[in-house]
Amino acid sequence: MSSPEHKKLIWNLIKDIKVGMLVTKSTKDGESMRARPMSLVQDAYDGTLFFYTSKSAAKAFEIKQDTDTCLTFTNPKDNVYVSLTGKAMVTEDRELIDKYWNPWVAAWFENGKDDPELAMLKVKINKGEHWDSTNNKLVQIFELAKSNIKESSTPKLGENEKFGTD
């Protein structure tokens, strides 16, 4: 997994992006992958991400068949890219539902917190990778041009780090 400092770094990269793409294996053939946007609901990260979902949503069935998931967060404007993999589960834990409930979520569930379809998706992250370039576009263009002139050099476009284990 990762240290508290690294978890803080990951949270700082994804918290303002808010929406990530959740990837699961399709239940139709068990091999093809399917992605859909999911909105973060928490205000801190300790190695687990939470999302609201409907119990009858395809992702809930897919996760019951195969808990392996991938979440990606991107902010091309700021050159931030994060890929996280982990194990997911669907839960009806009332404490979690109450803890993260907000008006945005309420708009999706007609009967509020008592909606019979309401559940939480809990994803325990075990590894990932992030790319973060604070260089402005001019510096990036310079690095790419320099790399093309010197065929052996790799452009220095920012930070890239892999973390975690299976």
Image (spheres, rainbow, N blue to C red):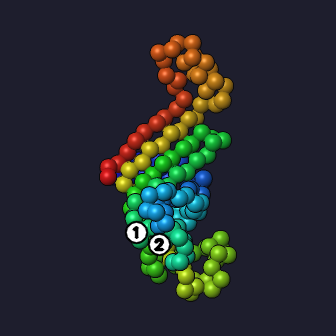
C-alpha span from label 1 to label 2: 6 Å
Q: Disc 1 vs disc 2: Cβ atoms closer than 8 Å?
A: yes
Residue drawn at (45%, 52%) of the image: 84
Of residue 132 and residue 59, the one placed in the foreground of this image is 59
Of residue 143 and residue 149, the one placed in the foreground of this image is 149
| Residue that label 1 marks | 65
Residue 100, image x, y percentages = 54, 72
Q: In the image, is 20 to the left or to the right of 29? A: right
Q: Is there any visible trace of residue 12 in the rendered image?
A: no
Residue 96, image x, y percentages = 47, 75
Of residue 23 and residue 129, the one placed in the foreground of this image is 23
**Of helix, strand and loop, which one carries label 2?**
helix
Residue drawn at (64%, 24%) of the image: 141
- Tell me: residue 100, above or below residue 135: below
| Residue that label 2 marks | 61
**Of helix, strand and loop, which one carries label 1?**
helix
Of residue 69 and residue 128, the one placed in the foreground of this image is 69
- Tell me: residue 32, above or below residue 105: above
Q: In the image, is 109 to the left or to the right of 100? A: right
Residue drawn at (44%, 58%) of the image: 31
Amino acid at circle 2: Phe
- Tell me: residue 54, above or below residue 149: below
Residue 30, image x, y percentages = 43, 62
